[in-house]
Amino acid sequence: MTAHSATLALDEAVRARLNEGEDVLHLGFGEAGLPVAPELIEVLADAGRHNGYGPVAGAPQARAAAAGWFTRRGLATEPEQILFAPGSKPLLFALLAAVEGDVVLPCPAWVSYAAQSALLGRRVIWVPVSSEAGGVPDPERLTQALRRSSSSGARPGVLILTVPDNPTGTVAPPEQVEAVCAIADRHGLAVISDEIYSELCHRGAAPSPARYLPERTVVTTGLSKSLALGGWRIGYARTPLGGWGRRVHEELIGVASEIWSSLAAPMQAVADHVLGDPPEITARIAASRRLHARVATAVHARLTAAGALCRPPQAGFYLYPDFARRCEFLRSQGILTGTDLAATLLDRYGVATLPGRAFGEPDTALTLRLATSLLYGTTRRECERALAVEEPENLPWIAASLTRLGDAVEAVVGAHHRS
Ligand SMILES: Cc1ncc(COP(=O)(O)O)c(C=O)c1O
């Protein structure tokens, strides 16, 4: 049986508690936590009359807009390389179906890659990330794992990279991405580069693997995170030029044509508008990026004050603290696993997080993934205010959540007790 995705299951459980009147601080779900940009509501309303299925890969205008969007970001792209889908999650599944071989994943990695691989009957080869950044396996350990896996009968065929990363909220440095792409090339692996957080780098731009392995990297992305449009389900892929890329594109069209037919036409109109980079949208994304960076940084300070090891946030709205240094105190409290730690935070303090186990780590790892994006407010007004001010972490409702979170974590891990 395929289990309910850990992130979606936790979100539903937390929302049920909230509906019952419980006061839960929700750090368990990777939703961007912001209202729809007002002009997009008008674009969507105007597009409501488009009711045809349209071409599987997307309407020519939307595909041209996506090609322009990639090209302006330094990856020259033709419209024929683009395929739209109802979110990048089904696109990733279709890609895994289209590309042969077992799946190499960084550990930790976003929850759905391993679950989708299992649905397709593929083995997963986990390779730890470096202490510096997540989303990309440590190059040396990748080489060792590939050597070991071939001798154990696995057939590694595809490597998934997440740049920038969920769950660690970091961006792998270009040298590391380049080194990993060179290894993938030597071993004949395809690369799927999940770049759904690329617009949310707190500083600079993320290094796309498509620069280093252009002929065998497929990029997936979408509007769920940059514009908080998760529920509108807009995703798109860029397949490479050349024979391999064309074959993958054809396969994708085949899978898409049998599963979702096409992205909803009104959503393609939204994509067409957004991917032209109009100034209001660019400004909205810049404001969101700043808000994510400020709040994630404020949460990071509280986690490290409580004794966690935690990579500083570089993109998006995630943190991945490791409480191994508090293991003695935690053991004395009967907390032996990441799952125990997350359960204690939720049951005793109403703080919802996910344990590292959901991301491929052994449960003995005392790691948690925190999404900081649902701290911005509970009303549209609060969230718009958080987007507008210089120091959102000082708004009373955000400051109160930060204090509550810091106090809860300190209490659970015994930050004031000597380990
Ligand atoms: C790394 C990563 N990839 C893909 C997705 C899926 O996004 P969507 O299907 O909304 O495009 C998410 C959403 O949480 C994510 O964090």
Image (cartoon, helix red, strand yellow):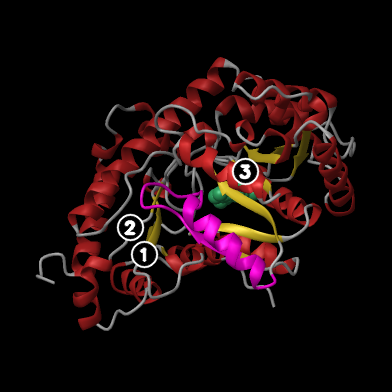
Range of residues picked out in magenta: 125-153
- What residue sits right under mark 2 in the picture? 321
Tell me the SS state at disc 1. loop
Q: Is residue 109 visible?
A: no
At 84% from the left edge and 25% from the top edge, which residue is drawn?
60
Compare marks 3 and 2 and give the one earlier in the sequence: 3
CA distance separating discs 3 and 2: 24 Å
Q: Position of residue 71 (x, y in %)?
A: 66, 21
- What residue sits right under mark 1 in the picture? 367
Q: Position of residue 75 (x, y in %)?
A: 65, 25
- What residue sits right under mark 3 in the picture? 193
Mark 1 C-beta to ligand 1 under 8 Å: no
CA distance separating discs 2 and 1: 6 Å
Q: Amino acid at mark 1?
A: Thr
Q: Quadrant of the C terminus?
A: bottom left
User: Mark 2 touching mark 1, by CB under 8 A?
Assistant: yes
